[in-house]
Amino acid sequence: MLYIFRATVTTSAIAVACLACSLQEPRPAEPSEHSAAALELMEGTSLKWNRIAWNRIAWNSISSAEHKWHELRVGPLASTSLPSAGPDPRLKEALLDEHVRAVLGYIVECALPPSSELHFDDLNGEPLTFTGLHGLAPTWENQACDVSCQRSVTACLLARVNYFGERNLMAWRRGSGIPENEHTAAMENPSTGVKNSFHLEEGAVWGNIFQTEPEIHTCRGVDSVAQVSLLNIDVEAYGGAVPMAAMRMCYGDQDCLDEVYAGPCGGTDAVCQERRANGGYHGCAAADGDTYTEVITIHRANFDIHADFIPGHSLDPALSSCAAEVADLLPACRDDWHDETCAALALDECGSHSVYESGLPLDRHANLCTAYVCALDSFCCEVLWDQKCTTDANDLCK
């Protein structure tokens, strides 16, 4: 009898944004809903959830509230003008608005590390707590946010957008303008497991939502595919195909697509100057003529709108082998909704055995759960899908 053992992997907790949104109309969600088990698994990696619904940070949330939080652009987040000891009354009033609360929560998550926590009171005296997560602009806690800080936080916000607010996991690579620190180190040097699981370059995002005329841009990555069959849009401007990054952000909103999509990241007609050794783009152009180095490049395990183990909108079989297998078993998963039954099929049928059962190693691209688990622990896809793999699947994929 052959026994296979492995070393125990010990990690500590990190916050991952798993925000609750409904399927038809994404409901306002506070950015503080996290899965503690998933957070612990993902410490020190470049993996990030992208579940911010577009209507949480787009024009209707940012532009309409812009006049209410000028101090966020010019002062430290933890300055004496902001905490509950006596913030500007305009901020107290603004925090009554669920959109403002949500956006401020996302901003704090992107800017500050998990160890940072900010406390505010709204105009009714209701205490609010905002916790850091990604640490892309940690100095903002005690210093004013300069232009580079604003651009870094903007790139983080845009990288996390999913039009419907449906959960998926992505791997980020940093541009040279994103601060390099202990919280972003994995964005500079992702692990082999992450690179193998998240092997498709979707594109890059950059901009500045904090300036008077916001800049929001995305470009097409080398592996980006198009999905236009469900969209009633003019595709001529995109060379007959809508880039996946733009579709994830805008879906069928023509005005949004026209505003957001800048062109191909690299190659002919490239909008970015170079692709760095870490796989991240650098020097990407904006409509205002500036060149941005605060860029986040996004890599994905597949290009569907949400994870196949998450109920939500129907998944396109052309974009993942598991979605195709599920559609063959139950066509309603393709034609109607990818509901709880479809999500269960993805976990149980895409592979030689269920992700919740020990057995032979599973193909890391069998479904998105196997991609997530094997990004963090290649043992599960190379040697044995053992009890730890099933535990990780329960933590990451439920």
Image: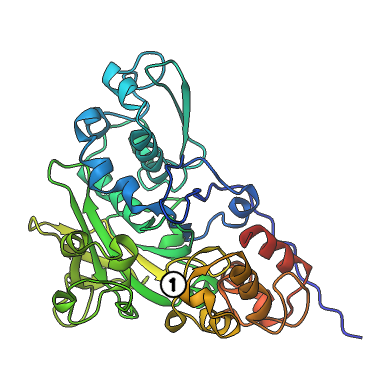
Residue 51 to residue 338: above or below: above
Q: Is residue 283 visible?
A: yes
Give the residue drawn at x 66%, y 58%. 395
Viewer-closest of 206 and 25: 25
Viewer-closest of 310 and 136: 310
Q: Position of residue 307 (x, y in %)?
A: 51, 67
Extreme residue in the left direction: 289
Tell me: 208 left or right of 116.
left
Residue 318 to residue 253: above or below: below
Residue receiving disc 1: 304
Q: Position of residue 213 (x, y in %)?
A: 12, 45
Q: Position of residue 237 (x, y in %)?
A: 14, 75
* Helix, strand or loop under label 1: loop
Viewer-closest of 261 and 283: 261
Q: Amino acid at mark 1?
A: Asp
Tell me: 315 left or right of 253.
right
Tell me: 379 left or right of 78.
right
Give the residue drawn at x 23%, y 59%. 293
